[in-house]
Each structure stands twice: as C-alpha cells, then as structure tokens.
Image (cartoon, rainbow, N blue to C red):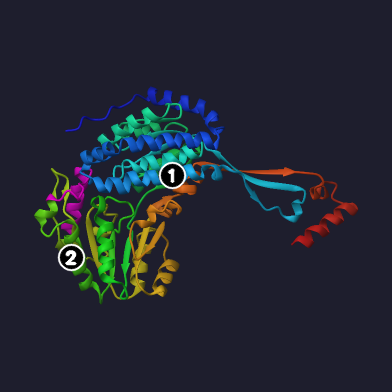
C-alpha cells in the first residue's frame, strides 16, 4: 500500500499564497528571455526524470511506459518547445486598426499576467494535465500553486520533488492532499483557476471562483460520440476507435464514449472492432489481463461503477461481445465491447470514463443528432466517413469542444489547436498560444496624438462645430 499524502495546514497554504501574491508584480515584469529560461529549466527537469515519471504512473495505475512517454511526457515537452520558441512573439503588443472617427490615435492589445493562479489536476493524466497548464502560466508571467490528484500519490510526490528542485516557491509551489486540501485552496482569492476533472466538481470550482470574481478555465468531459457512416472505411474506423477508447484504460476525457454505426455496417464494425482489440491487447481474456500494454483503473469505486453499468445494461437487453471482466481488488476492467445498446441503457446515461465501448446502430443521421444534442455538448466528436456532406451536416447540427475526422484523440496532440470544452464539457481553452491567452489578461491600450477628431464631440453641442461633428458621424455610418 502507498502511504497517504500529507495534509498541509491551512496556515501553510496561506503562507505560500501570500508569498506568491507579493512576488507576482515581479513576475509580471519578467522579459521573454527570463520566461524562456524558466521554461528551459522545466524542460531539463522533465528530461532528467523521464524514467522516474513513467515509473511513478506505473506504480499508481500500471500505466504502460510507452503510453506515459507519448501521452504525458512528450505532450509536455512539445508544449515546452513551442512556448520557448514563441513566447517572445506572444508577449509583443498586438496592433489593431483605428477607425477614421479616432483619427489621431493608435491602439494596441497588451497581454499581462493574471497574477497568482491555481492549477488543479486530475488522476487520469496526472503528469501532463498539471504540467501543460503550468507551461502556459509560466509563459504568461504568472505565479502558480499546483494541486495534483490524491488518487495518484506516486506521481504527486514526483511532481512535488520536480517543482521544488526547479522553482522557488514564490514562483511555483505544489500542495499535496485530498479533497479537503482542494476545498481549502478554493477559499483563497486566486486571480485565475484552472481545473481539469468531472463536471460535478467543476460546478463547485466555478462557484468558488465566483466568490472571488476569479477568471476560470474548466476542462471537463461528457459523452463524446464516434459516428461511423455507411461510406466509412470500417477496418480503419474500428482500429482507430478501439485505440482511442482503450488507451489509458479508457480514462481519457476525449475518448470515444460510444459509437453510432450505420445499421448496414454494424455487424462488420463489431467484427472489425473485436479483431482490432485482439491485435492490440491479446487474443484471449487471459492474455488481455496479463498484457503490460493495458493500464488499470485509478480508483476501486470506478471499477464497481463500471461493473454495475454493464450488468444493468445487459439486463436491459445489451450483449457483451468481448470483455466484461471486473476485478475491484486489482482495479482491472477488461477492454469491453457491448452491442445491442439502446439510448436508455445505463451505459448511455453518463460519461463512461473506462474501457467499455457501447455500440449503437442508426438508420438516419437525425437519430444521431438528436441523441448527441440530448447528452449536452461533448468535449470531442469523431466522424468516420468518406462523404463530406455527412461531415458538414454533423458539424452544422451539433456542437463539441473539438472534432476529428477519420481518427481519434489526435486533435489533442496539436499544440496549435485550442483544446477545451463548450457548455457542460468545459469553459475556455488552452494549448500553445491559446494557453498563454488563457492565463493572460488582454489589456487594451489607446494612445492619442494631436490633432484628434475627438475634439469635435466636446460640449457645447451646438453651433458650427457641432454641425460639422454631426455630418462627420453620418459620413462614417
């Protein structure tokens, strides 16, 4: 058993917060070169601990080393490389146009840091979902307090050591602990809060931010659909959906939550999906349970939740095509595909967040659109088709945080794309410049030079000057 994380006293949190608040004005004045140096330190610290980072996540939930490398370490280093290359460009004031009415003035947008920010990370990607927003916060010139998930204590301890070795606590500090520590942090008047996790906790975070009028970024989740139409390449669609669903044991906020397949291709898709699963994880249930390439569920309670959802769905008429094994003691849930699922099945009532893939058949695209809308705006949507009209229709009739065509998950890997939800799946976005922007305030700056037409609009509002002003306004309409 891993020893429980220490629970810092509120006084220790207050000390860190006050030290950072006092230091924030200095951080706000840092140059691009100084921010680049801090980012470089973080990059070197990560590279020197590569094996330890992967080992910590394996200890927490048997995350395969390659998945740790690709989905956690590489993602963070890619964000760092982009930020180090571009931070100077991002920081430059942005010139905006001047309307004729304001002749004699010039305008700029100046990006300034928000101040002291709180970053609260989840358990499913316990390294990258702390480090990636931290990169953006540093690039924008903020001080930051980090709160990783208590459900991944080994990764939390590694992050604490990494942060302490890389930054002074007046710039970046990490606080460990459980929900009560998270609640205590939310009592402090942070300038910005970045939260990744469930919608349920997201509402609590949003309420806390409202108390202090803090700005907020929420990365939540939802039921992200995959739609496979009659024209799709079934073999390719099945393999990419199976990979996207079962990587990290399905604990990915943008994983395909369920698949809607055109009824004419449903049998072929199920056969292809099963074959893909067997190629990736093993041909038998025993091989899949023993493979080192499949992670475990982070929390025992989620194993029991998934088991209950599958069993009740089967009782309602669904069929387990492959998988269906649950072991709460080892936190193992077999990669599972379920067919014959209806929209009122227990598996379809909330985000699954585990290695269970329901497959539904549809006849008309209207059925898909209606259900997607009913579930709320998802964090991601995946469309598999060779027909551009289908893509255009689904894009026009639905809304999602991100969309990928004929693939899954890869939109997250492009730091040039904003990553974030919409509606119930989140608020705000980050990655690359979008992350810098999330942790910055866009301050408008207007400078007046002489002469300026604005004098035409000073009182008194009569006489020849007023008549000239009135004519100028009408000419500009």
Mark 2 burial class by Cα count in 10 Å: few <14, some 14-19, many 20+:
some
Question: Residue 58, located in which quarter of the rendered image?
Answer: top left
In the displayed structure, does residue 251 sit left or right of residue 335?
Answer: right
Residue 4 coordinates in the image, percent (x, y): 23, 30
The residue at which mark 1 appears reads as 81
Residue 186 visible at all: no
Quadrant (top left/top right/bottom left/bottom right) for the N terminus: top left
Q: Residue furthest right?
A: 464
Total label count?
Answer: 2
Which residue is drawn at the image coordinates 34% and 32% (left, top)?
162
In the displayed structure, does residue 177 sit left or right of residue 322?
Answer: right
Which residue is drawn at the image coordinates 25% and 50% (left, top)?
248
Disc 2, SS: helix
Q: Where are the magenta residues, as a range?
A: 290-312
Along the viewing direction, whichever of 338 and 94 lies nearer the viewer: 94
Q: Earlier in the sequence, mark 2 or mark 1?
A: 1
Question: Residue 377, located in which quarter of the rendered image?
Answer: bottom left
Residue 467 visible at all: yes
Which residue is drawn at the image coordinates 27% and 52% (left, top)?
353
Task: Point out which mark residue 463 bears.
Answer: none
In the displayed structure, does residue 350 sit left or right of residue 438?
Answer: left
Q: Is residue 361 magenta?
A: no
The residue at which mark 2 appears reads as 275
Quadrant (top left/top right/bottom left/bottom right) for the C terminus: bottom right
Mark 1 burial class by Cα count in 10 Å: few <14, some 14-19, many 20+:
some
Which residue is drawn at the image coordinates 43% and 54% (left, top)?
422
Residue 389 coordinates in the image, percent (x, y): 42, 74
Residue 330 coordinates in the image, percent (x, y): 14, 44
Residue 20 coordinates in the image, percent (x, y): 47, 27
Disc 1, SS: helix
Spatial separation of the CA atoms under disc 2 and disc 1: 38 Å
Position of residue 435 relative to residue 232, above or below, is above
């Amino acid at each position: 058993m891993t020893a429980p994380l220490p629970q810092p006293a509120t006084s220790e949190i207050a000390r860190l917060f006050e030290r950072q608040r006092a230091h924030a004005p200095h951080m706000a004045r840092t140059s691009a070169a100084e921010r680049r140096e801090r980012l470089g330190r973080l990059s070197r610290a990560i590279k020197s601990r590569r094996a330890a980072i992967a080992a910590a996540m394996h200890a927490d939930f048997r995350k395969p080393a390659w998945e740790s490398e690709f989905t956690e370490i590489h993602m963070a280093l890619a964000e760092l490389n982009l930020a180090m290359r571009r931070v100077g460009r991002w920081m430059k004031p942005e010139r905006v146009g001047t309307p004729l009415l304001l002749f004699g003035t010039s305008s700029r947008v100046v990006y300034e840091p928000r101040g002291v920010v709180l970053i609260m990370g989840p358990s499913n990607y316990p390294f990258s979902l702390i480090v990636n927003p931290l990169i953006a916060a540093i690039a924008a010139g903020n001080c930051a307090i980090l709160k990783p998930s208590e459900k991944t204590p080994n990764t939390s301890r590694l992050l604490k050591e990494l942060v302490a070795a890389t930054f002074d606590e007046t710039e970046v500090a990490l606080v460990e602990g459980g929900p009560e520590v998270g609640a205590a942090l939310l009592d402090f008047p942070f300038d910005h809060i970045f939260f990744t996790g469930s919608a349920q906790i997201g509402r609590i975070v949003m309420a806390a931010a409202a108390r202090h009028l803090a700005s907020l970024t929420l990365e939540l989740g939802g039921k992200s659909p995959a739609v496979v139409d009659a024209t799709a390449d079934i073999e390719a669609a099945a393999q990419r959906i199976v990979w996207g669903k079962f990587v990290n044991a399905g604990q990915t906020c943008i994983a395909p939550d369920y698949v809607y397949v055109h009824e004419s291709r449903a049998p072929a898709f199920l056969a292809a999906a099963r074959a893909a699963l067997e190629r990736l994880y093993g041909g038998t249930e025993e091989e899949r349970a023993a493979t080192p390439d499949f992670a475990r569920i982070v929390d025992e309670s989620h194993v029991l939740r998934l088991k209950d959802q599958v069993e009740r769905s089967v009782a309602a008429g669904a069929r387990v095509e492959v998988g269906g094994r649950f072991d709460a003691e080892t936190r193992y849930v077999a990669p599972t595909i379920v067919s014959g699922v209806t929209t009122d099945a227990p598996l379809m009532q909330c985000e699954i967040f585990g290695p269970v893939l329901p497959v539904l058949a549809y006849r008309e695209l209207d059925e898909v659109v209606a259900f997607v809308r009913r579930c709320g705006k998802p964090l991601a949507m995946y469309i598999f088709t060779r027909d551009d009209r289908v893509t255009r229709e689904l894009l026009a009739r639905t809304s999602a945080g991100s969309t990928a065509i004929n693939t899954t998950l890869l939109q997250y890997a492009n730091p040039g794309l904003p990553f974030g939800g919409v509606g119930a799946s989140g608020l705000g976005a980050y990655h690359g410049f979008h992350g810098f922007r999330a942790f910055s305030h866009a301050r408008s700056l207007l400078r007046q030079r002489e002469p300026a037409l604005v004098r035409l609009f000073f009182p008194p509002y009569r006489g020849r000057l007023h008549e000239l002003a009135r004519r100028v306004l009408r000419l500009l309409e």
